[in-house]
Image (cartoon, rainbow, N blue to C red):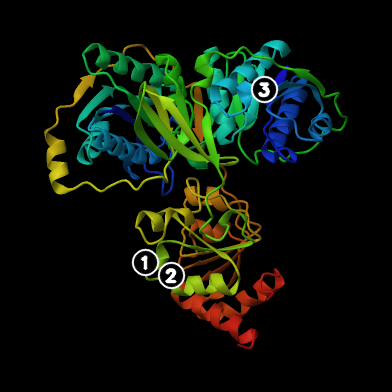
Amino acid sequence: MADVLVCIKRVVDSTGEVVLTEDGQAVDGRYAGFTTSTHEECAVELAVQVAGATGGQASVLTLGDADAVEQLRSALAVGCTAATHVEADPARFGPADVAREIAAVVRDHEAAGHPHDLVLLGNDAADSGDFQVGIRLAYELGWPVVNGVATVRVEDAPDGQSVVASGDGPEGHETYRVPLPAVVTVLEGGVEPRYPTVPGRMKAKKVAIEQRTPVAEPAGAKRVRLLLPPPAPSNVQVLGKGADAAPAVVDLLEQLGVLAR
Amino acid sequence: MILVLVETDASGAVEVSREALTFARDLSSAGGGVPIDAVVVGPVPPGLREQLAAYAVRTVHHADGEGFAAFSGAAWAAAVQAAREAAGSVVVTAAGTPRGNEVLAHLAARLGVAMAANVLSFGGLSPFVVTRQVVGGAALEEMRLDERPAVFTVAGHAVEASPAPSPGPADLVECRPTLSEADLVARVVSTDEPEPDLSGSLKSARVVVGAGRGAGSADGFADLLELTDLLGASLGVSRVVTSLGWRPHHEQVGQTGSRISPDLYIPCGISGAIQHWAGCATAKNILAINTDPDAPMVTKATHAVIGDLHEVVPAINAEIRRRRGA
């Protein structure tokens, strides 16, 4: 039986055009909308799968503004059964600050008789791209950490439970086996996140979310400002429109030497 | 002193590590020519020392042995930490690979300093300000690294790898970090051969035919697959195609899929969101087929056809067959 805590981040949906706020300190989400950071949708799915396979529980945590409750409800709708919201302006929190806040929640839950065996996070946040919160969290807790894996399962071992996690490394598909408690960071691609069902959504609305405030003043992210990369000048050569362009395309294929056969 | 974690394969230092060494040399020049050391973990491939000498490396700190037989981010970080103490480094850097980011994140956590991932360039030295990729490369962040050592990884292709005008000694010294039990708990227990690449070696393909939302449905790929077959190419798709379940995830090109560098990429009905661009930016030639002449994929392409892929692709297929006399 494994108790899993999955940590997620509300981020601006950056599949379209990215716009910055006027002060250059953040990505503007007013038009693009918000979503759960890419890898964390898979982390939620893995948390729910591990909880299901071991008869355990999956809880979800976020540090974010008041609107981040939307992302917590999404995770509750697909199988998480408890949620914690550390309400704060995430832009003021650097990766070390976030790791410290998550560690405080884990410790408090343990002190309250609800210890977590496994903490899952995304490998990196889709917005700040710091690649380090999970690792810093592990050092805060004194737990081992496996980084950047696509699949996670929990097995019973003679001396307790272990997490078996796999992902692609430079020399092939790598597997780690680590005793719990542990931290694991997830890359998308190993599992398909499930869609919430209507009863799932109804159930999610009724879950009481644990509301917290940060335990410490953040040191910050050391951000000076955000910039947009300069637009590259377009040098595109248009070969034509519609089906009539086919001969010009095949000329190009011949010229590039990719048509030989 | 600047310390660079160098990743190796059978042929020596990997290209992105040579890029990090080049970045370190630019930083060294700006700082009055401080020495550059390298740290290498595991077996030293033949020719590596000569290669590092060509990049003006002063000392190669080499950690090897039982503790490093299987990868552990914490153990590697212990090696980098020991090399950093030996060298007195005020800057520690690595390539922004999964390993590089992981090991330096461990190092930063152990030292209680900040880490900047995927740096493209540096501005001032005092304060030390770096510019790095955020939002998957769609935006840049200027970030201060006030603590010492300054720890950061260098984004792939931020600079072009180039040997130094005059070589360094690249003296090899043993690096023997004390590894605790905790450093070895989370280590790789088995490595399997890479999964058979079901997408026809997408990552190494010379020609890739791409398909995006414009394919229209799971049934909209017949002409694209025929073109793929006619060119002996691989099929690559955008994230929306896998999200909608039209094609399997292993065919995805982009920030969270495969990164491809073919001679020719033919994205069809792909608008070119930054996440997708991150996976195909290094293609030598891009022929975009799209109904929207202003789509980012079209403006960034070398060549384009404006039109519906369902009209253009069958016409190309027919033209190829005609010229082959079939």
Q: Could one spot residue B34 in this view of the protein?
A: no
Parent chain of label 1: B
Q: Quadrant of residue B242?
A: bottom left
Q: Nearer the viewer, residue A21 or B34?
A: B34
Query: According to the image, label 1 marks what residue?
Result: B218
Of the two numbered discs 3 and 1 on the same chain, state the one appearing first in sequence.
3
The amino acid type found where label 3 is placed reads Gly
Chain of the residue that carries numbered disc 2 in the rendered image = B
Q: Quadrant of residue B167?
A: top right
Q: Can residue B27 be seen in the rendering of this structure? A: yes
User: How many marks overall?
Assistant: 3
Q: In front here: A233 or B240?
A: B240
Q: Which residue in the rendered view is the most extreme toward the bottom?
A: B325
> Tag 2, which secondary structure?
loop
Label 1, label 2: how many angstroms apart (C-alpha)? 7 Å
Q: Which mark is residue B65?
A: 3
Which of B119 and B239 lies nearest the eye of the viewer? B239
